Amino acid sequence: MNLDFNHIKSIPQLIKDFLSDNLDFAASKPFSFETISQQIGEKEKSYSPKVREALHQSLTKQLHNQNLSFLQQQNLDLLKQDNTFTITTGHQLNLFTGPVFFIYKILQTIKTTEELKKQFPTKNFVPIFWMATEDHDFDEIDHFKTEHHFYQTKAKQGGPVGRIKVEDQYFISEFEKEFKDFVFGTELILMMKEAYKVGNTFAEATRIIGQNLFADYGLLMLDGDDKALKALMIPTFKKELLEEQLFKTTLERRNLLEKKYHKVQVNPRAINLFYLSETRNRIDRQNDKFVVLDTDINFTEQEILKDLETNPEKFSPNAVLRPVYQESILPNLAYVGGNAEVMYWLELSDYFASVDVPFPVLIPRNSLLFLKEKTFNKIEKLSLNISEFFEDFASIIKKHLLENQALHELLILQEEELKKRFSVLKEEAWQTDVTFKNLVEAEETRQLKSLKRMQQRLLRAEKIKHSEKLKRYEDIFLEVHPGGIWQERQYNFSVFYADEGPDWLKSCYELMNVEKSELIVSHLI
């Protein structure tokens, strides 16, 4: 069963408007083979052979000690050709991949390239995973959850997480206790031990896991913490330092989003660059100096520009500047991301235009929900529908508890009749005297409140009367939403992989719908 994002209450309205091609501003069009065709034309005109060569050299260097599959080597070689394009996703370097949607976004990226090969046989398409190695908030990535346990590691913090080395392995022994008896438990344990060997960096660990899971799918993993690639960004970084280009070009879009949707996903700073030393710290301009916050490092304008030319690897884009870095160095057509990612990318299209980089097609990734057969049976026995678990569930419970309750139906009828009678009274009262109209309105409010209190008392009575049934509703809700949130944000992939192994990856791949953003609900074997 699939649930369209447009019909799920919790999906942000901005995403729904984007998917319906109903935005009030020019940005990326929703995914279609027609929009991809247009994107190919734009990228062909703008992407230079020099950048393509630098990308191929950097990726070759990064992957030199990896045991590449035939398909990976083929994709790496294809990147040298001017008719080769990429589809990209990215994520933080979460411990053992973190929540399971890490897996889903990669599989959708891979499947999208496969579908594009069928549609455009004269072109080549390569799936890329952008490793967020330069993020420095280790607290966001140092843990993952399974059905029964919470796993966490410790490390020295402050610098780019991709450079942090594994020291603490306690989580591995605990993980082994939980998974050693599963069919694919040993495979998971060995994968974890290989990745998080003492001395490995978190970038190396994530690459090892990616290789284990996706080598046969041809996925190439790219680390942006690379001097040669950042050298290509010197002109863009220079404008960011001197002209506050990103902040200024996104201001109008951010104001529009704030007005219509009452929030923006991210707010760019005047300068959206960090400086890498022993730690990663924000660059700020203070009077005639460029200051690296929380350090003793500062530069004159001339000094910082010289440092940028000489040591571009020391300059690190933040989350809102990273998209243009990515799209500048890749022959990329589309980005597969979560809803929050897509929303902040939508703030940036004017900035992309200002630096002459084509804005990619944005693809809100599919969500997946795996439930056991017994859970589906419970849902059916209680006359529920899986879609109801993604509405206001308190209202759904109320509806089912009060279904065919004669007194409740009578109270609703009385409320409707009351509103009709007072509507007539208010119209007449207005023509008679304003103060009398106020009296009528006050009486209407009092009587409606009284009816509402009776409805609430009735609901409480029904909950007590049907407490066992209410408990079953709540238990099923937690099976669908473990921890009270979407399953894909709670559980690590190991929860599903432990029983089914690579076949689970294949089933996820088959379920993916590259032409539509939706929640896909499936049975666990």
Image (tube, rainbow, N blue to C red):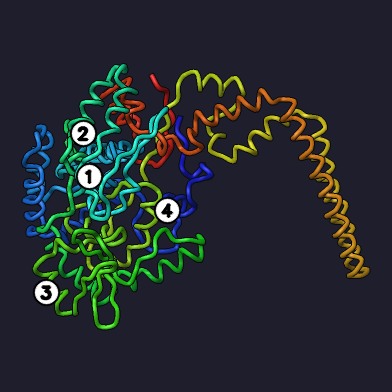
Seen in the picture, residue 384 relative to 416 is either above or below; the reply is above
Q: Secondary structure at mark 2?
A: helix
Q: Secondary structure at mark 1?
A: strand
Which residue carries the number 3 mark?
Answer: 306
Camera-near label (4 vs 2) is 2
Which sits earlier in the primary sequence, circle 1 or circle 4? Answer: 4
- Residue 502 rendering spot, x and y as whole percentages: 25, 24
Which sits earlier in the primary sequence, circle 3 or circle 2? Answer: 2
**Residue at 43 percent of width and 37 percent of height:** 519
Image quadrant where residue 241 sits: bottom left
- Residue type highlighted by circle 1: Phe
How far apart are the two marked residues, 3 and 4, measured between alpha carbons? 42 Å
Which residue carries the number 4 mark?
Answer: 18
Q: Nearer the viewer, residue 421 or 219?
A: 219
- Residue type highlighted by circle 4: Phe
Q: Residues within 10 Å of mark 3 (few under 14, many from 20)?
A: few
How far apart are the two marked residues, 4 and 2, measured between alpha carbons? 30 Å
**Residue at 27 percent of width and 30 percent of height:** 172
Q: Which mark is residue 403?
A: none
How far apart are the two marked residues, 1 and 2, measured between alpha carbons? 11 Å
Q: Are marks 1 and 2 in contact (CB under 8 Å)?
A: yes
Horizontally, is 21 left or right of 272 in the view? right
Which residue carries the number 1 mark?
Answer: 129
Which sits earlier in the primary sequence, circle 3 or circle 4? Answer: 4
How far apart are the two marked residues, 3 and 1, measured between alpha carbons? 32 Å
Which residue carries the number 2 mark?
Answer: 214
How far apart are the two marked residues, 3 and 2, measured between alpha carbons? 41 Å
- Residue type highlighted by circle 2: Phe
Q: Secondary structure at mark 4?
A: helix
Which sits earlier in the primary sequence, circle 3 or circle 1? Answer: 1
